Image (cartoon, helix red, strand yellow):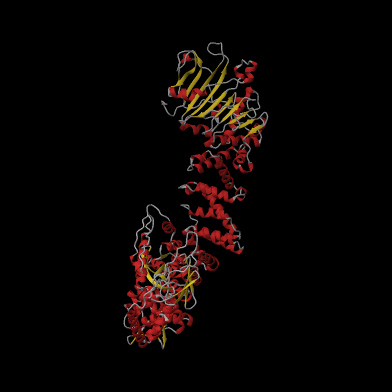
Amino acid sequence: MTLSDPSKIQQQMYTRERRGIFRSTEGYDTIAKSKGLDPNWIKKALHPFCVYDAPAELSARGEKEDTAYPKAMHLFHNDTGQMVLGRSVYRSTDFTGLRSTFFTHNYVIPADRIADIVNKSHSWLDVLYIDSYDIEQGMELAELDTLPTAEQRGGAPSDPIAWLESIGIGEKLFKQLLFAVMSSVASKRKVYVALDVPIELVAETACRLLGVLYTCLPYAFRQTLGFITYAKEPQSRKGIHLTFVEKGSLRPNDRNTDKDYTFDLASQRVTNADVDFSKQPYLDLAWTNLTQLDRAEDFYQFAGQMLADMDAVRHTAITSYHELAVFYQVEAGNESLYDVNKNAVLRAMLEYLTPVGAITGKKRLNELFMSRFTREFELVKQRQIPELQLVKCLKEYAELPDTDVDKQLVAYMIGAIHNAQLDKRKDRSEAFYTLVGSQPSLSRAFFDTVLNLGKASELFEPYIQQQFLTAIKAEDVVQLAYQWSSTHPQTLKNAFFVELAEKQLVSKLRTESDAVAAVNATHDLIDELLERNRDYGNGTLMQKLSYSADLFLLTELNLEQVRKEQLLKIGFLQYPDEVKSWAARFNQQVQSKAAIMLAAYQWFVEQDPDETVFDDLTLSELDQVQKLGRNWLQRDIIPDQFGRLVLAFYCEAPSGTVDYGALLHYLQLNSPDKETLYQFMRWSETQMNFVRSRKLVPAYAAAIVSYFKKHDRDAFKNRANRKAYFEQAGTALKPVYEKARMELSSPLVKFFKRNKKVSLMLVTMLVVVGGTLLGLQAAGVFEPPAPVAVEQPSEGKKSETDTLPQTGKEHKPLVFAELVTDKVEGVDKVTTQLVFEVATEAECAAFDTKRIQVTFNDGKQIEYKDRKALSTCKANAEDQLGSALPDKEAVSQGEDKQGSTDSATGDDSAAGSGNTGTKPADTSADGKEKDSKDEAKLSENAGKNAAAGETAGALPYRITVKLGEQISTSDIREVAVGTTIFPFIVK
């Protein structure tokens, strides 16, 4: 819409005529308008309000008199900011004289003139309207400078309260109606009022009631409210908040109005307007202002000033006027409104004083707040304890720009905390301290004042003690001490503060899981703080804290639990002379602990330490240091640590400078493997603590022999160990190994080694006897008799005797042991196998490996079950041995599968008995090729043994059983297989 003069008031008229501006035929249309009104805007914004519905009551009785029908005045604000003020009236006849119609006259007021019209007076309620117009006069209306008003005005009555009572509106109902109207402006809920007056007086009464309401509405509401003084039915319209309807149109439980505010004055029924009037201070003020219009206008000006820099939403929020009503009345001397809820009043004041420039721009409110501050300070001086929220408000006020109450606030806080302490209100005093500490500038001013006024013992020391107690770590204590001493240098002269910092540092160190790391972190933090602020004057305090941390380690560190890595990180141990001088100030216990720590530090920090690191120790201290070192070295036994390890067993004794037995026992218990002990023995051969005159110290040599006898009896039976360690031993160590090996030999071997002459004589006699026997055999003296034919029993019968072929003389079965190397998980492993020799095929076939028991000379027994056996028995014996083989092999030997073939290989076997025979060879498809080869090899060996049997006495049948582990065979006495006892021989 384009106005010819933006400041002019425009006009528009609407009715039923022969033609109009927008139509050339008869009907309802705009018949005249000012030139500043845009046609499209007229149709969109004004036409919807050009309407009139005659009252049902008058229509029912056929009323013809135009003046009997209520005049419907309306006011609304459009989206472009203009205000439309108009009126629609009933006309009994139109231009034809045949039908009724209505006539609407609207004034369109520019946005910048609305405030002047609705705020200053209510004359606009009595504006003059035109009820008819002759289009022959022209369709253009004049633009107006002002609204035309009647000389006699019927606005607000002179005695509003009395007039309200006359139409059935008391104080409560009026406050409800005012609350509903103000709430409707800020929400989408509508207000519908049905007056209890004759229908002819509805519009007039509504207009006068609007006059009363407008005197109670702040300016922002006046510039927003829309209303209609008469409507036939309640109907929601955009821009209309308050509608006066025909009596009887507000029906109970009407779904169209169930969420709106309704006031049916005839029945005194009000909906959705129940409020707690004790919490509506503005409604109380508005009611009293009905008879004090000057005070009302002063309040509106006060409210406008307070809301000028606030968010637009607050201008039409009823809560804003509740707050402002309290401020206004407290300013006028109504202290009860403040006393009943001090916190809420002060908090609300702060919100209005927070915007930039508000302190200087809202002098009335700022002065009011300062008067509250002064009042509260007086109460503190009277030993009252203020509420925490109230103190927060005062503190936040002091933080606002353009305020100058820092000194007053500090004095106020001192008094408040002092009062709380006197009344033993610890919770309140701690809360006040928290408020002080939350603002650095306030904290600095507060504690400077406390320290300078000599009130440290009352107000500073209890607070700082609590601060240190709540610190979690030692670093927190250092940080706290630094902050306070740098912010308040006076604290450096406060003995309580300095001593408390030292004590709390030590207290926190006691709770640290790693005290050494905590102390080092403390030193690092102190160095960082002092480096950050070189001009800082509390270096002495930081040095005291650093000293306290080191003193804690010296006096309280538990050496029994300290780890090597921890001790080596203790900085002061790098300066042994200073530590000794320092420790000399304390008792003997501390001096002893210092000596132990220094010795342990030098022992493990030096590259090649020797026994001189123990020079200053007593025997008791030496024992503690060595115990400490032994604990540290348990999991670090490697060749590089052998020299350090020896010091753990250093001693002054006639037998040598090392406790050799304890050293080897320690190695035996903690070494990762036996090879580490052998490596240590080889290393020790080059060390002066273990060798004298090119021989091992006797005590050390004895300890080595004792070790092998007690813990490593099979050491010399391991070929790998012999080659790697024992055979490579030097001149000092080799005799000791020989002695140990001798001690571990069998009694017979020991006898021969100890009696070499007797051994030589026995060997000579054996050679002579052997030669004689060979000569006799060549002469045929030992030819066996011809074999006797034995009748074979018929099928199903037994022979009368079970006599097997006999050899020339009776041979007892025997067993001996061999060491073999097998692949176990890809690694060569030395294991023991037992070799059983029997004289007859029957014995071989009956051999059962389900249970084998090995008995030693000392009575010890080891039992093996279900071991695998390989033999040189005939085929009938192999079936019996099959039970000792794995399942697949047993099946393959007992069944003929997939074309297994038999091959006769018996030449070697025949050589032993003088007969030619065949030996079946099982080659099943899924059999083990290795086992077949082993059996073939055993068969070959058995044949060779049988061939030499007559001359060497070897038994012809052999069974080999692998035990799966390596055992000591020198002390085996016998081996039991089932119930048969085999004597053990050494080969």
- When the figure is inspected, residue 455 is found, relative to residue 627, above or below; the finding is above
Q: Is residue 515 left or right of residue 262?
A: left
Confirm whether residue 449 shows in the render.
yes
On the image, the x and y values in percent for residue 117 come to: 51, 31
- When the figure is inspected, residue 860 is found, relative to residue 329, above or below; the finding is below
Q: Is residue 296 left or right of residue 936?
A: right
On the image, the x and y values in percent for residue 472 come to: 49, 64
Q: Is residue 199 left or right of residue 970?
A: right
Count every numbered label the image shows and give the total.
0
Position of the N terminus, as image quadrant, is top left
On the image, the x and y values in percent for residue 486 come to: 43, 66
Q: Nearer the viewer, residue 583 or 657?
A: 657
Q: Residue at x 63, y 16 (%)?
A: 63
Confirm whether residue 582 shows in the render.
no
The quadrant where residue 747 appears = bottom left
On the image, the x and y values in percent for residue 67 come to: 60, 19
Position of the C terminus, as image quadrant, is bottom left
Q: Residue at x 62, y 63 (%)?
A: 423
- When the figure is inspected, residue 233 is found, relative to residue 320, above or below; the finding is above
Q: Nearer the viewer, residue 424 or 69?
A: 424
Q: Nearer the viewer, residue 48 or 981?
A: 981
The quadrant where residue 262 appears = top right
Q: Nearer the viewer, residue 132 or 489?
A: 489
